[in-house]
């Protein structure tokens, strides 16, 4: 390719790039973003409702799961997942002098104890939701046995 042709091609490319920048620059010059969103950014449509019907429909199952969780957490040392069982494991690790295991299990115990007030709060919230669902005439599905 001759030198003058390479120069002409480069000049054309620069002219096109300059024209594109010149048209985009005024929209950005005042510091405000352009009105058109980026084509890569997609927005989800806004919800049309708050999902109350679905919450009311799942209410018995949700209540059952919370009840089962609280029963497990408050269970005796023979119940896997109970606070009492984990407390026993923490005590055994401390007695055996396993400080790293003790620290790990004690942190798990702290978290597990924090679940009880959270689940109790959710249980109370669901009682008021159940009353609201009944008042609205939104039937809930029977709990799975």
Image: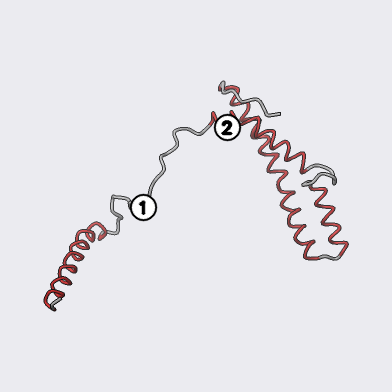
- Up the image or down, 115 lies above or below 68; here it is below
Q: Which mark is residue 40?
A: 1
Q: Which mark is residue 119?
A: none
Q: How many marks?
A: 2
Badge 1: few (under 14), some or many (20 or more) residues near its Cα, within 10 Å? Answer: few
Q: Position of residue 55 (x, y in %)?
A: 57, 32
Q: Position of residue 112 (x, y in %)?
A: 73, 49
Could you say which is closer to the camera, residue 138 or residue 39? 39
In front: label 2 or label 1: 1
Badge 2: few (under 14), some or many (20 or more) residues near its Cα, within 10 Å? Answer: some
On-image quarter of the C terminus:
top right
- Up the image or down, 72 lies above or below 5; here it is above
Residue 16 in which image quadrant: bottom left
Which residue appears at 82% of the width and 49% of the height?
85
Q: Position of residue 51 (x, y in %)?
A: 52, 33
Which residue appears at 59% of the width and 29% of the height?
56
Looking at this rendering, what residue extends furthest in the right direction?
A: 95
Q: Is residue 111 left or right of residue 78?
A: left
Residue 118 in which image quadrant: top right
Which residue appears at 84% of the width and 60% of the height?
93
Q: Position of residue 105 (x, y in %)?
A: 77, 57
Q: Secondary structure at mark 2?
A: helix
Residue marked by disc 2: 55
Which residue appears at 18% of the width and 68% of the height?
13
Looking at this rendering, what residue extends furthest in the front direction?
A: 1
- Up the image or down, 110 lies above or below 22; here it is above
Could you say which is closer to the camera, residue 16 or residue 91? 16
Q: CA distance from mark 2 to mark 1?
A: 33 Å
């Amino acid at each position: 390719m001759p030198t003058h042709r390479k120069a002409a091609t480069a000049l054309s490319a620069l002219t096109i790039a300059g024209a594109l920048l010149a048209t985009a620059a005024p929209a950005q010059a005042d510091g405000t973003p352009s009105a058109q969103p980026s084509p890569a950014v997609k927005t989800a449509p806004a919800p049309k409702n708050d999902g109350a019907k679905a919450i009311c429909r799942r209410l018995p199952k949700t209540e059952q799961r919370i009840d089962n969780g609280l029963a497990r957490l408050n269970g005796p040392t023979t119940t896997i997942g109970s606070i009492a069982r984990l407390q026993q494991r923490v005590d055994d690790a401390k007695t055996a002098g396993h400080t790293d295991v003790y620290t790990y299990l004690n942190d798990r115990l702290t978290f597990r104890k924090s679940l009880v007030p959270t689940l109790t709060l959710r249980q109370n919230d669901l009682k008021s939701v159940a009353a609201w669902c009944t008042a609205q005439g939104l039937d809930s599905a029977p709990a799975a046995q």
